[in-house]
Amino acid sequence: MTPLRSRIAAAVLCLLLGPFGIHKFYVGQWGWGIVSLFLLITLGWTGWIWGIVYAISIAEAILLFTMSNEDFQNKYHVRPL
């Protein structure tokens, strides 16, 4: 059984470390976490990408903060049959 994750912890990780994709690793979306890291490593030297990625992270953190716990569990966790 997949351990349950905290919605608030995911939102805080998103708010603080969102550009690095740490919250994606936390909720089990490893593919998106790797994509986030790849984009920052390859395009991060340009500088402007940081603002875009951080703006997306803030928007996602707001969604996580306002999402209900039930919706969060249904979206990010596979429950056994």
Image (cartoon, rainbow, N blue to C red):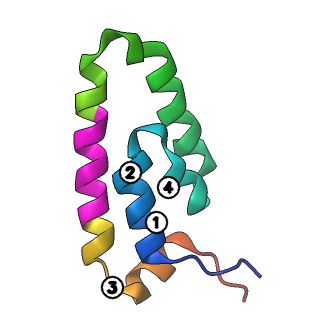
The disc at residue 16 is 2
From the image, state whether disc 2 or disc 4 is nearer to you: 2
Q: Amino acid at mark 3?
A: Ser
Q: Secondary structure at mark 2?
A: helix
Of the numbered discs 2 and 1, the one sitting upstream in the chain is 1
Q: Amino acid at mark 1?
A: Ala
Q: Is residue 70 left or right of residue 32?
A: left
Residue indicated by mark 3: 68
Of the numbered discs 2 and 3, the one sitting upstream in the chain is 2
Residue indicated by mark 4: 23
From the image, state whether disc 3 or disc 1 is nearer to you: 1
Query: How far from the left and from the top, in percent, is residue 60?
Result: 30, 56
Of the numbered discs 4 and 3, the one sitting upstream in the chain is 4
Q: Is the residue under label 3 in contact with that under label 4 (CB below 8 Å)?
A: no
Q: Amino acid at mark 4?
A: His
- Residue range in magenta is 53-62
Residue indicated by mark 1: 10
Farthest residue, direction right: 1
Of the numbered discs 2 and 4, the one sitting upstream in the chain is 2
Query: How far from the left and from the top, in percent, is residue 24?
Result: 52, 53
User: Which residue does the image show at 57% across and 76% down from the upper left?
Assistant: 5
Q: Quadrant of the C terminus?
A: bottom right
